[in-house]
Image: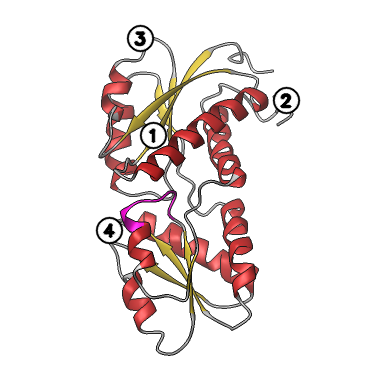
Amino acid sequence: MSQATQQKIHVVATSHGTDNANGQQLIHDLRADLERRSEQRFPVQLVWHEAYVDVQEPRLEAVIAGLPEGEPAVVLPLLVSDGVHTTHDIAQAVASRAGTSAALPLGPLPELAQVLAQRAAGHLANDPLVVLAAAGTRLDVGQNQVKNLAEQLAVLLEREVQVGYCAGAQPRIADVVGNAAARPVLVLSSLLADGFFQQKLASTGAGVVTSPLLPDVMIAQCFLVRLQKALEEELFMSPDDEVLTR
């Protein structure tokens, strides 16, 4: 067991924020599920906090500023890929307080690719064009994560997987669907929860648009993978620590 095992660690679970009521509830449910599962999984004392980088309150910077002095904290992005919110908003909040670090967003986790492949499996009989839909960012790091995820999906599904973005990057999802001509299209949503972008996917005219990632127990597990890695990197626990029964 690591020497920091008994230390209190604040986890600031930070999502984008949405004015969609169902999307808000899905994020609340995810946060509660993560807290419950972390108690069963990690041999460390975690104190969970709610935060947002846009649209909703409390804002991340205010939550970080209000944490007890001298107690370590980890920002857990409830986000699918890197973008301005991780490289600017979260990075600034982390830099503003000593003893604060950040986990990675989901990114191209193999476990996430497996979830998306399972969702595609029941919709392949008519040989559709498969398109991985992402929110989008102008940053190369986020775009490369989406492309990596699409490449994993292509291997799992044994077929080409294209990428389409809702905003911030090209090609836009509506153009990818529109250019498919008469071929059926399967849009795999990699959006976390209901909101404006999921509505944009539904308006593309694709034959099938999958639901957002939440609710799904495997998505919660993916975020716990990211949290565990961050805890290990900050020496709050080590790979040799026993991970408790889930």
* Residue 176 is a magenta residue: no
- Which residue corresponds to mark 3? 69
Q: Residue at x 61, y 43 (%)?
A: 217
Residue 119 image-quadrant placement: bottom right
The crowding category of the residue bearing disc 4, from other C-alpha atoms within 10 Å (few below 14, some 14 to 19, many at least 20), is few
Which residue is labeled 4 in the image? 138
Q: Range of the magenta residues?
A: 191-197
Say which residue label 1 marks: 14
Q: Name the mark on residue 242.
A: 2
Gap between marks 3 and 1 measured at Cα: 20 Å
Q: Residues within 10 Å of mark 3 (few under 14, many from 20)?
A: few
How far is disc 1 from disc 4 in space, using C-alphas?
A: 21 Å
- Tell me the mark number nearer the camera, choosing from 1 and 2: 1
Disc nearer the start of the sequence (3/2): 3
For the residues carrying marks 3 and 1, which lies nearer the camera in this image? Answer: 1
Q: CA distance from mark 2 to mark 4?
A: 40 Å
Say whether residue 157 is visible: yes
Asked if the residue under mark 4 is in contact with the one under mark 3, i.e. CB atoms within 8 Å, the reply is no
Q: Please, what secondary structure does the residue beneath circle 4 have?
A: loop
User: In terms of sequence position, does the residue under pointer 3 or pointer 1 come before the other?
Assistant: 1
Q: Amino acid at mark 4?
A: Arg
- The disc labelled 2 sits on which kind of residue? Glu
Q: Where residue 184 sits in the image (x, y, percent)? A: 49, 82
Q: Residue at x 38, y 69 (%)?
A: 164
Mark 1 or mark 2, earlier in chain: 1
Judged from the image, the secondary structure of the residue bearing numbered disc 1 is: strand
